[in-house]
Amino acid sequence: MKKRLSILVVVCLLASLVLSACGNGAAPGSSPSGVPSPSGEPSPAAEDHAPVTIMVAAAASLENVYVNELLPMFKAEYPWITVEGTYDSSGKLQTQIEEGLAADVFMSAATKQMSALTEKGMIDGASVVELLENEIVLITPSASNTSIASFEDIVNAATVAIGDPASVPAGQYAQEALTALGVWDAIQPKTSLGTNVTEVLNAVAEGSADVGIVYATDAAQMLDRVKILAKAPEGSLKSKVIYPVGILSISKNREAAELFVKFLNTPAAISVFVANGFKANA
């Protein structure tokens, strides 16, 4: 009788341990805290990895969505990876990479800069993803009563702010559109060139320029201070405004860089981009 009682106690203890283990297990596709990960796949435990830091060089128009939303999301899924960012015009970032910037990932506001670095072997071409699409728009201060209503009307503005076409993709797109519309030469005496698209946006918001040309996503983040007058007319740009992302050939943190690029292409990350005015590049 005592022997049977002992066996029963042991069986009960084993059953209790099994139930406890099942109760503590995280559901498939969840992070260590049990929260679903953006990729929908199980998140590896942080203790299984050595801490690593990667540098992302990204267009100025990406800074807000990166800093405020995407980087915290990525950190929650991959807690051992720290992402540091440097944000500026894509042309300036291209030059910095050519001069030895120790970045791991580059995300440009145009294919021109990415293609140039890929041709020089500085970007791994196989890693490049043409991720997003944007638009350029004509803006004015929110309190303005301007009669300007189209890109063609820009000749009537007293001052026009655009990104410097020499290094700022938004400025290059602006020049292309205004040239196609036949008004580029006419506005030269009244243009103010910004070193990146954020500078142009701020110049208009502060009233330093009557109008300016920026990305739709930038204008959307400051609709309390600027208003959109018009989008670039159909056919004024030869190609779409594409944002590609790729991994630098010199990256010493290739695995972490690949995880970050893969993360940017997940439905969760794309939905954040879309909520901030971007379009997924089909």
Image: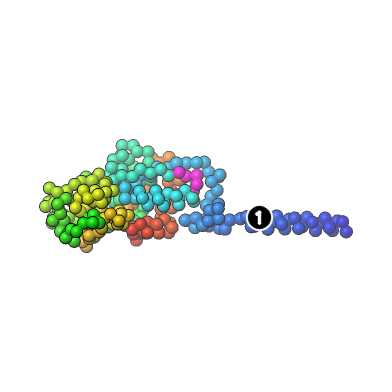
Q: Amino acid at mark 1?
A: Ala
Residue appearing at x 77%, y 57% in the figure: 11
Closest to the observer: 205 or 13? 205
Where is residue 266 shown, x and y percent of the image?
Answer: 43, 56
Residue appearing at x 50%, y 41% in the figure: 51
Residue 158 makes an appearance in the image: yes
Query: Which span of residues is magenta-colored?
Result: 78-82
Relative to 7, say whether 203 is above or below.
Answer: above
Where is residue 108 shown, x and y percent of the image?
Answer: 32, 49
State the residue lying farthest toward the bottom. Answer: 234
In the rendered structure, the answer to whether residue 39 lies left or right of residue 229 reads: right
- Please say whether residue 79 is one of the residues in the magenta stretch: yes
Residue appearing at x 53%, y 50% in the figure: 44
Q: Quadrant of the C terminus?
A: bottom left
- Please say whether residue 159 is one of the residues in the magenta stretch: no
Q: Main secondary structure of the magenta part?
A: loop
